[in-house]
Image: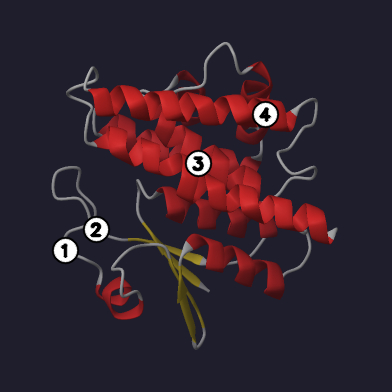
């Protein structure tokens, strides 16, 4: 099994964490990346396999797939234990919805902020930060006194951890209004698979002279 990712790919990191959590043997291929040119030149295998021209891409023998959620589903099918979707059908549906919302509801606000770092008072930036905080507020209520977002540890936790990591980097961090979520994040950071992948991303950012959120800095030692 071969996983194509990049040093600052949020979606690639999701897939990599999941593979480590599953104990799956795989070769990690980091595609060319540079802070100014980004993913240029594009890796030829990524171009060949993914019409969106993006990582992550997973190759397992004659199977070639892309998209982090599709990779989650494949890993869960070929290696059911340890399960990373809840067993109960309704709990599984809720976890899948949370994973989807991390990518498609929360993360677009972070993407907007990526282009507005030089103008933090721009109304679009203010709106994006406010929307991110509103999402944290909802997740603070959702997790309640539980350890994980969907009851048991799942892909939903992996997805939101990586998304909020980028949110924290892009001036939309959790606040003192989110103590349960911050304790959840500490539990996530303590997992070896998460620390391994997020720590590597943090070390790359440091090598490029970029600041880190405090929780990520702890993983770079």
Looking at the image, tell me whether mark 1 or mark 4 is earlier in sequence order. Answer: 1
Q: In the displayed structure, does residue 163 sit left or right of residue 21?
A: left
Between label 3 and label 1, give the one nearer the viewer: 3
Looking at the image, tell me whether mark 1 or mark 2 is earlier in sequence order. Answer: 2
Q: Quadrant of residue 81?
A: bottom right
Task: Name the residue rendered at 59%, 13% in the picture.
Answer: 177
Residue 52 lies, with reference to residue 217, above or below; the image says below
Return the residue at label 2. Answer: 32
Task: Name the residue rendered at 69%, 75% in the picture.
Answer: 78
Residue 162 marker: 3
Task: Name the residue rendered at 76%, 26% in the picture.
Answer: 144
Return the residue at label 1. Answer: 41
Residue 162 lies, with reference to residue 28, above or below; the image says above
Whether residue 46 can be seen here: yes
Q: CA distance from mark 1 to mark 2?
A: 7 Å
Looking at the image, tell me whether mark 3 or mark 1 is earlier in sequence order. Answer: 1
């Amino acid at each position: 099994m071969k996983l194509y990712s990049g040093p600052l790919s949020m979606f690639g990191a999701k897939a990599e964490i999941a593979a480590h959590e599953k104990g799956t043997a795989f070769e990690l291929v980091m595609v060319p990346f540079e802070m100014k040119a980004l993913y240029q030149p594009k890796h030829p295998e990524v171009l060949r396999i993914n019409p969106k021209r993006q990582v992550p891409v997973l190759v397992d023998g004659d199977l070639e797939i892309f998209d982090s959620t599709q990779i989650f589903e494949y890993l869960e099918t070929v290696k059911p234990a340890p399960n990373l979707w809840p067993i109960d059908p309704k709990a599984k549906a809720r976890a899948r919805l949370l994973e989807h919302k991390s990518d498609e509801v929360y993360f677009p606000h972070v993407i907007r902020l990526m282009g507005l770092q030089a103008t933090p008072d721009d109304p679009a930036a203010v709106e994006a930060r406010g929307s991110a905080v509103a999402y944290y507020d909802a997740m603070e209520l959702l997790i309640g006194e539980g350890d994980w977002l969907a009851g048991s540890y799942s892909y939903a936790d992996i997805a939101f951890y990586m998304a909020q990591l980028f949110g924290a980097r892009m001036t939309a961090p959790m606040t003192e209004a989110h103590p349960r979520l911050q304790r959840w994040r500490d539990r996530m950071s303590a997992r070896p698979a998460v620390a391994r992948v997020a720590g590597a991303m943090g070390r790359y950012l440091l090598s490029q002279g970029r600041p880190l959120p405090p929780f990520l800095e702890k993983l770079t030692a």
